[in-house]
Image (cartoon, helix red, strand yellow):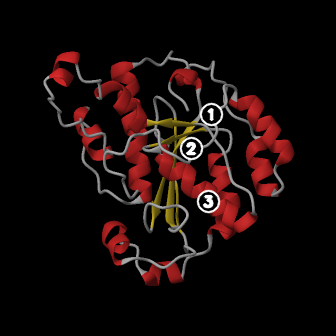
């Protein structure tokens, strides 16, 4: 994905964060107008009371032309089904998408998706059913929820007139919770400002001894995110940790 650097995980534009996503999905399944979106909500959401070891998950990453979902568009999507013990690479999906905005030289440099590739690619509306089927019934794992949530929401609103909501486990938010502690009173009184720990995907993986992968490829970043969550749970939580303790 196009990373937001050290952006605080809790940014504007987040989807709703209901206490009970199962109940919320039941309501959304009744109110959604697009049949593809209705089917997505109809698959339901795992209960927040489920231990992580029982939760079906899918890691998601999108590449975009920029960082503003109201001005930029999605150029690729990668999804990797997973659990706490396995990464189901054989079931992974990857799509190059024709955005509804022009590519910028900066974005091409970052994700290497050129005009020639997007000219031959389908619009998101064409592959939307397949994308939603890949996500349905699973908890979506991302690294920076503001990207995937906001871009998918804005892209669907532009195409079908209604957005999308879904719960996520955000590995970037978990890293911030674990490694970005408030400065001590003494440090604040002395005016000391420590450089915040990086919570970028590659730097987060390095803390757990995970290998470095090629960045800014939607499928590879989704895989990297899946492995990062498994490492985070192994080091700081447990397979018995309840989903509600880590989702948003």
| Circle 2 Cα neighbour tier, 10 Å, few/some/many (<14 / 14–19 / ≥20) | some
Q: On the image, numbered disc 3 is attached to which residue? A: 154
Distance of mark 3 from mark 1, alpha carbons? 17 Å
Q: The N terminus is located in which quarter?
A: bottom left
Rendered residue at 48%/52% (across/down): 147
Distance of mark 3 from mark 2, alpha carbons? 11 Å
Q: Is residue 164 above or below residue 235?
A: below
Where in the figure is residue 50, as x and y percent of width and height? 61, 20
In terms of depth relative to the viewer, which is nearer, 108 or 92? 108
| Circle 3 Cα neighbour tier, 10 Å, few/some/many (<14 / 14–19 / ≥20) | many
Rendered residue at 54%/70% (across/down): 97
Distance of mark 2 from mark 1, alpha carbons? 8 Å
Rendered residue at 35%/32% (across/down): 175
Residues at circles 3 and 1 in contact by the CB criterion of under 8 Å: no
Q: On the image, numbered disc 1 is attached to which residue? A: 17
Q: On the image, numbered disc 2 is attached to which residue? A: 14
- Report if residue 89 is visible in the image: yes
First along the sequence among labels 3 and 2: 2
Residue 45 is tagged as: none
Q: Is residue 101 above or below residue 92?
A: below
Residues at circles 2 and 1 in contact by the CB criterion of under 8 Å: yes
What element does badge 2 sit on?
A: loop
Q: The C terminus is located in which quarter?
A: top right
Residue lying furthest right: 30
Where in the figure is residue 207, as x and y percent of width and height? 23, 33
Q: Is residue 234 above or below residue 30?
A: above
In terms of depth relative to the viewer, which is nearer, 102 or 12? 12
Please identify the quarter of the rendering in which residue 113 is found.
bottom left
């Amino acid at each position: 994905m196009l990373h937001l650097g050290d952006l605080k995980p809790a940014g504007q534009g987040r989807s709703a964060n209901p206490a009970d996503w199962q109940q919320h999905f039941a309501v959304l399944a009744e109110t959604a107008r697009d049949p593809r979106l209705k089917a997505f909500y109809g698959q339901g959401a795992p209960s927040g009371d489920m231990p992580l070891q029982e939760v079906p998950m899918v890691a998601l990453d999108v590449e975009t032309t920029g960082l503003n979902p109201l001005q930029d568009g999605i150029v690729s999507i990668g999804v990797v089904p997973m659990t706490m013990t396995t990464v189901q690479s054989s079931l992974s999906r990857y799509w190059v998408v024709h955005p509804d905005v022009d590519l910028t030289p900066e974005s091409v440099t970052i994700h290497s998706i050129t005009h020639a590739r997007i000219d031959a690619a389908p619009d998101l509306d064409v592959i939307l059913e397949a994308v939603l089927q890949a996500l349905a019934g699973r908890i979506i794992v991302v690294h920076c929820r503001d990207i995937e949530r906001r871009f998918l929401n804005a892209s669907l609103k532009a195409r079908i007139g209604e957005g999308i909501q879904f719960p996520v486990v955000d590995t970037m938010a978990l890293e911030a919770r674990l490694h970005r502690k408030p400065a001590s009173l003494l440090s604040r009184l002395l005016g000391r400002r420590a450089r915040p720990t990086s919570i970028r995907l590659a730097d987060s993986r390095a803390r757990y001894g995970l290998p470095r992968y090629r960045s800014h490829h939607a499928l590879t970043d989704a895989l990297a995110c899946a492995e990062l969550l498994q490492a985070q749970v192994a080091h700081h939580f447990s397979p018995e940790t309840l989903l509600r303790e880590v989702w948003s």
